[in-house]
Image (spheres, rainbow, N blue to C red):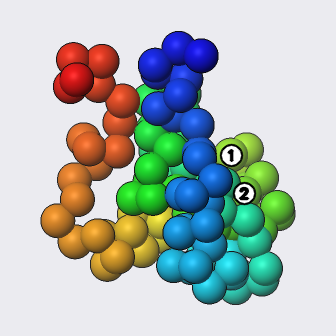
């Protein structure tokens, strides 16, 4: 597995930590969800780290990925993560091949 691919994947321990952090509930609607949505998407180098992953139900995850509501949902997710990780800038949520 390539280093970038591995860095963007969500490891089981990260899913567990995010699930616990979010109480197993979608951060958008409160329904049961899965901790597998990237705030900064994989296509933009979004890492599979706790500080970049949110819990979302299937419907909200689909809306986040494929709808005109994306911009507003990203704002909500960004504000949510900023409360949880106040000193964690977006730059640290992206893969940087020169960081290692």
Q: Residue at 21% x, 17% y: name it.
A: 98
Residue at the extreme left: 87
The answer to which quarter of the image holds residue 85 is bottom left
At numbered mark 2, what does the secondary structure look like: helix, strand or loop? helix
The residues tagged by marks 2 and 1 sit, at their Cα atoms, a distance apart of: 6 Å
Q: Position of residue 83 (x, y in %)?
A: 31, 78
Q: Are marks 2 and 1 in contact (CB under 8 Å)?
A: yes
Q: Nearer the viewer, residue 49 or 76?
A: 49
Q: Residue 53, can we see it?
A: yes
Q: Position of residue 54 (x, y in %)?
A: 56, 63
Residue corresponding to mark 2 = 61
> Would you call the spot at circle 1 few (<14 residues within 10 Å), some (14-19), or many (20 or more)?
some
Q: Is residue 100 left or right of residue 44?
A: left
At numbered mark 1, what does the secondary structure look like: helix, strand or loop? helix
Q: Residue at 39% x, 59% y: name it.
A: 51
Residue corresponding to mark 1 = 65
Q: Residue 68, can we see it?
A: no
> Would you call the spot at circle 2 few (<14 residues within 10 Å), some (14-19), or many (20 or more)?
many
Q: Residue at 79% x, 79% y: name it.
A: 32
């Amino acid at each position: 597995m390539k280093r970038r691919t591995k860095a963007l994947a969500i490891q089981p321990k990260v899913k567990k930590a995010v699930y616990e952090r979010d109480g197993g509930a979608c951060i958008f609607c409160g329904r049961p969800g899965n901790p597998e949505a990237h705030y900064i998407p994989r296509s933009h180098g979004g890492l599979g780290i706790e500080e970049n992953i949110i819990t979302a139900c299937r419907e909200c995850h689909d809306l986040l990925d494929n709808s005109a509501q994306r911009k507003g949902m990203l704002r909500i997710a960004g504000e949510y993560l900023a409360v949880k990780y106040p000193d964690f800038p977006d730059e640290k949520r992206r893969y940087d091949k020169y960081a290692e």
